Amino acid sequence: MTTCKAFHQESLDDPDAFWSREARRIDWHRPFVKTLDYSRPPFAKWFVGGQTNLCHNAVDRHAATRPDARALVFISSETDSEIVYSFAQLKREVMRMAAAMQSLGVVAGDRVLIYMPMIPEATFAMLACARIGAIHSVVFGGFASASLATRIDDATPKLIVSSDAGMRGGRAVTYKPLLDEAIVLARHKPAKVLMIDRGLVKFSPVKGRDVDYASLRERFIDAQVPVTWLPSEHPSYILYTSGTTGKPKGIVRDTGGYAVALAASMQYIFCGGEGETMFCTSDIGWVVGHSYIVYGPLIAGMCTIMYEGTPLRPDAGIWWQIVEKYKVSVMFSSPTAARVLKKHDTAFMHKHDLSTLKHLFLAGEPLDQPTHEWMTRELGLPVIDNYWQTETGWPILAAMPGVEKTEIRYGTPSFPVYGYDLKIFREDGTVCDADEKGIVAIVPPLPPGCLTTVWGDDERFVSTYFSLFREPLVYSSFDWGIRDKDGYHYILGRTDDVINVAGHRLGTREIEEAIQGHPAIAEVAVVGVADPLKGQMPMAFAVVKDAALIATPQKRDELEKAVLKQVDTSLGAIARPSRVHFLTVLPKTRSGKLLRRSIQALAEGRDPGDLTTIEDPAALEQLQQALARTPV
Ligand code: ATP
Ligand code: MG
């Protein structure tokens, strides 16, 4: 048995040998002739000359050997439905969808935009695109017309696949009117819209443009659509980054490299094998959903669970009930979801048999120590924080229990994953020492599965990601990090989340961690606010565990003082926020990311910008009220 460290080193010392061995995990229609072509840095081409297909590897090869094995379980706690698809059934559904797309003129290389709730047809549509070589671009259902229109104009899809509505918290969330408006706003007009009518919300189809899927599916019920073999570097999809920090970038993923990277990660990181079940609670609109709801588990021959609903309906035990019922062995969620569950009685968890579960993986934002510790204790399992980005498609930093069972420490996503030559740089381009804070960067070539470019804009790919320094050429993550003496890595927030207080540079994450250390605080966001004297001052927005603690202005004032003192003692007075505002909820996107830019804008009295993805609009009102309140 090798160690994570040796395994990582091996991947960097001889990437050709490492990745050509890993490439055997998938089927190749034509073998590749070169493992890596890096003749045009920073553009890396993996498995050159090879031909393969994502859908074949995710569906067909399993349908051929284990047709009746479970492939996809759709569960909606909103519509009370549960549908199980075997690999054979999944293949049939994908071929029907692929035939429908072909009948609407879609051919290899065309873009298909998917704007859909969490229903099986969304997965069928993604796999159908992969099958015929069309490039899908899934846009998260939480985005409204303006954001959708920008993405339509950037991806210029021939076809859009959509649905009448999704369901959330017992209410229908309409999609169709937002889509119609987006198409009006967009300069590019897609020729056809394929509609999956769930019968949740009435809508009027646009004549000549909107096509009903139910009738097409009937027409193609027996369709046989062969897999289109694609060059390894063929773009499989475009996925826009969340846009938390700037204008969304259309991340382009290849075919062969992605398939290999996911297949390897399923063993080394996620420890999921054929016949087992994976439950990833993300959404197909995000990268985690692409990689670990759809492609990763299916490529590994696992059954994947697709869940529509919240973690709290009908009660806070719903996810654990699913784990028990489907004998889930790999679960993947987010720190936000973990914090939501933490607020509820643990009896909801403990009444279920979770003995099949091997690990819980959490990613997407910093996992605070108290939540990490709580979840580990309650589950009695390793809870694995993993750090990555839409850009990379799979984890950059993680514990790799499939390689070696390393000690899990709270508050850290552990070690660089094989394939990533990760280094922490000073701003002058030199490498940091242990325990020294710097910019998390990857020395290229990027491993298989990572972005190959920004859609339609090679220039932007280079200028955005590879121009941190003139020398050396490195990929910047735009996150701050630290590596400690034992090799554990800590992510300290975004590089543009830095607050510059009278020349001192402070990371918001550090201040947040300090405040979180106060027993009364459940959650906190710190942003930098323009200050005429000091340049910037940190300002904190905290959620208290018990509303009684801030029931009167005096109590609020006392708690604020206590929290400020906490910062003084753990970081020093320089990091002390100008104010601590107390709220009951923080403004976040529906995927759990803090809307930092908006919080900062409001605190500076500016326009908060695009807020279409906000989870709870009431959070904004609260924030504004809190800002208006003067201290006692
Ligand atoms: P944009 O790049 O458009 O501003 P975004 O960075 O929010 O959007 P994503 O690619 O979805 O879009 O998020 C990746 C980022 O999320 C990382 O760069 C990091 O800041 C944060 N992140 C992800 N996982 C973790 C983790 N385990 N710990 C800390 N931060 C994390
Ligand atoms: Mg980003």
Image: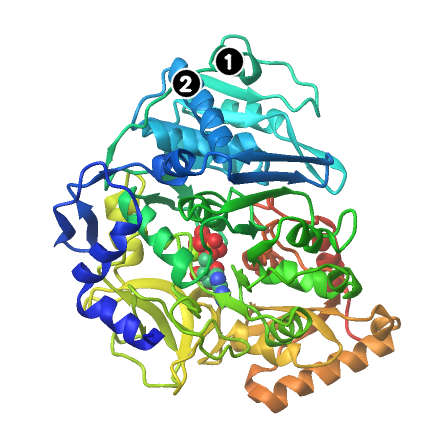
Residue 593 in the image: x percent, y percent? 57, 57
Left/right placement of residue 507 relative to residue 176 reads: left
Give 61 or 264, whichever is nearer the viewer.
Answer: 61
Farthest residue toward the top? 208
Quadrant occupied by the C terminus:
bottom right
Q: Can you say whether 602 is above or below 434 in the image?
A: above
Q: Which mark is residue 260?
A: none
Identify the residue at image location x=46%, y=20%: 96
* Residue 7, position as x, y percentages in the image: 29, 71
Does ligand 1 reach within 8 Å of label 2's beta carbon?
no
Q: Which residue matches tag 2?
A: 99
Name the quadrant of the N terminus. bottom left
Marks 2 and 1: in contact by CB < 8 Å?
Answer: yes
Callout 2 secondary element: helix
How many C-alpha atoms fall within 10 Å of the one at disc 1: few (<14), some, or many (≥20)? some
> Of label 1 and label 2, which has the lower sequence position?
2
Check residue 216 in the rendering and tell me which mark sits there, or answer none. 1
| Residue type beneath disc 2 | Ala
- Helix, strand or loop at disc 1? helix
On the picture, is 510 further left or further right than 618?
A: left
Q: Which residue type does callout 1 highlight? A: Leu
Instruction: Tell me where residue 333 sits by quadrant.
Output: bottom right
Note whether 456 is above or below 524 in the view shown.
Answer: above
